[in-house]
Image (cartoon, rainbow, N blue to C red):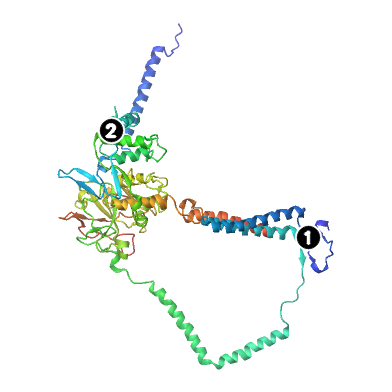
Amino acid sequence: MNNVRTLSPKRFHWVAALLVLLLGTVSLYESSAGAASNSPLQTTRANSGTPNSSIVVKNKAGTITKYGDGAIIYKLPSSALIPLGKALFEENCASCHGTDANGVPANGTSGAYPNLRGLGPATVDFWVVSGRMPAADPRSVQAGRKAGRLDAKQALALAAYVNSLDPSYPYIPTPNLKTANVSDGEALFSLNCAACHTIEGDGDALALDTYAPSLRHIPAYQVVEAIRTGPGNMPRFTGNLSDAQVRDIVKYVTTEIQHPNNPGGFGLGGLGPVAEGFVGLALGVGVLALVGFWVGERQ
Amino acid sequence: MSDEMEHRTPVSLANVRADDPHLQPAAKNPRRVEQVIGLLFVLGIACFIGFAVTYFLDAPAWTYGATLGMGLFLMGVGQVAWGKYLMPRGPFVEERHELASSEMERTAFAAAIVDRGGGTVKRRRFLFGLLGGGVGIFSLVALIPLMRSFGPQPKGTLFKTNWKKGSYLVDSTGRRVQVGDLGIGSIVTVFPQGFENSENGQAVDQTVLIRISDEDVVTGKGRETWGPHGYIAYSKVCTHLGCPVGLYEQQLELLVCPCHQSQFDVTKAAIPIFGPAPRPLPQLPLYVDASGNLRSQDGFNQPVGPGFWERA
């Protein structure tokens, strides 16, 4: 035997165990710290769950029997979709929102993720069908619109299932755009929407890394859902906009904003004088200078 | 002198011989250039015909401009190329006569102006005086719009808005806001009733009404009763340069100014937490009357909008 001190296999195990414990504690601390802080994606329950329509019919007991009118029709998703929704929920949503959809995952902290109960079908449908949920990164500041993992029918099924746990409002809206007044819609858009989404509907940066998304390529019913439920940081437009006014705004968004009439052929992103000035200077003056040089050049 | 340099020396067009290199086209291969120019003209003509066709087909408006513009452009390029490459390359000079008139003519002209012209004007002293007076009066009158732009003094309007004790909160259509109207996370721009469509009202009275809760909200000391049922109201005029602070982020509970990104904390008396705004947005104290209407307890307790010299 030599008497050089080496790390015996037994001692090595102790050191390794200590290291693993240390790293484990640190990572556990980090993950719990992250989970405990409220994610900006948080949607509080108080934030939704009213019919949010200008026409509400209640019975004597105070239960809502009917709401919405000819301007926007609100429909509860078919209860036949609930089993499909339950399966999809457990597969795609329960790991964060918990199997009870109350925002508490299996071994997680209450309040770490949004409580979905009582939010109403339109809120759930909007977040899923716009691709924001399931979230790519649950800790990101803002979930962006993307090609959804779930299609429109699956989103509806999820909405039906989550709503069946704690029935609420608003239902899935269908605006009746045929009767809409696009001119009123333009005025209301300028007053209520353009501040954040810009007058061309392209969206813009807001505070603390949040942004107002572009309004292009968004189906009419999803625009209603957003206006009525106020997803994320967007305010919720309720009593101050009647169903008819919301319908007018949606008509304006789905016609003039999404299909702008550009007499010149190119809208240049509707960015206004910056983009137009750039093209004017770079192309207009640049090409003219080249042509002038060619015309005046001597052999 | 090299051959090339000799070609570059300007010659008088009248004296060149028929075989002078100055009369040759600039292009090395004129036949080829002629074909290219011909092609440009043919394309240009095709564009002109295309313009007529689009017109009759009622095509999108931009096709008019594209065909007509491209046609004119191609014809122009063809002509410039013709001039540059196929015409005699030159350079030529042309002698010209002296531009100035003869000494005698100039003297006679000066005499005519000074002697006869001056004498004629002097004879009409009265008219000359009137004309001078007119010019003077005109300059004084032209100053009036400038003087006008210095006034009137804004006086009280800088300090006081049209919000008074008991003013009803109405939206831009004049509808009174009721306590049940807004959901949590909603925002609406309100005016004191009667001023929703007045020019002055649009400028200084505009106020954002936000509902952040369904319980009473206290945004600061001395403001215990100002936010009934979760409603709070702030002046919409930014304290930086007066832009409308209409961007409300409901989860961050921030009001954002679109001009210079000032951010105001809605829950803490709208103190600016980012950006150039120097002061919080003034808060309007609210109360709910017996019939559920939102009304103001009083006007703003400080001037709204950007600072000014007389502001305390």
Please say if A103 is above or below A24. below
Where's residue B295, x and y in %?
21, 57
Tell me which corner region of the image, top left, top right, bottom left or bottom right, holds residue B6.
Answer: bottom right
Q: Give the image location of residue A298, x and y in percent.
A: 72, 59
Q: Mark 2 lies on which chain?
A: A
Q: Nearer the viewer, residue A40 or B154?
A: A40
**Looking at the image, residue B256 lies above or below residue A296:** above
Crowd around label 2: few <14 · some 14–19 · many ≥20 (10 Å): many
> Secondary structure under badge 2?
loop
Which amino acid is tagged 2? Ala
Q: Mark 1 points at which residue?
A: B8
Position in image of residue A186 (x %, y %): 37, 55
Q: Which mark is residue A101?
A: 2
Q: Residues within 10 Å of mark 1 (few under 14, many from 20)?
A: some
**Residue occupying the point 32% across, 59% down:** B305
Secondary element under disc 1, as helix, strand or loop, is helix
Residue A236 seen anywhere in this rendered image of the structure: no
Chain letter for the residue marked with disc 1 in the picture: B
| Alpha carbons under labels 2 and 1: distance apart | 89 Å
Residue B47: x and y in percent read 61, 56
Same subunit, labels 2 and 1: the answer reads: no
The three-letter amino acid code for the residue at tag 1 is Arg
The furthest residue to the top = A1
Mark nearest the camera among 2 and 1 is 2
Please tell me which residue lies in front, B312 or A24: A24
Q: Residue at x 39, y 71 (%)?
A: B149
Q: In this view, does B229 lie to the left or right of A23?
A: left
Q: In the displayed structure, does residue B182 sit left or right of residue B39?
A: left
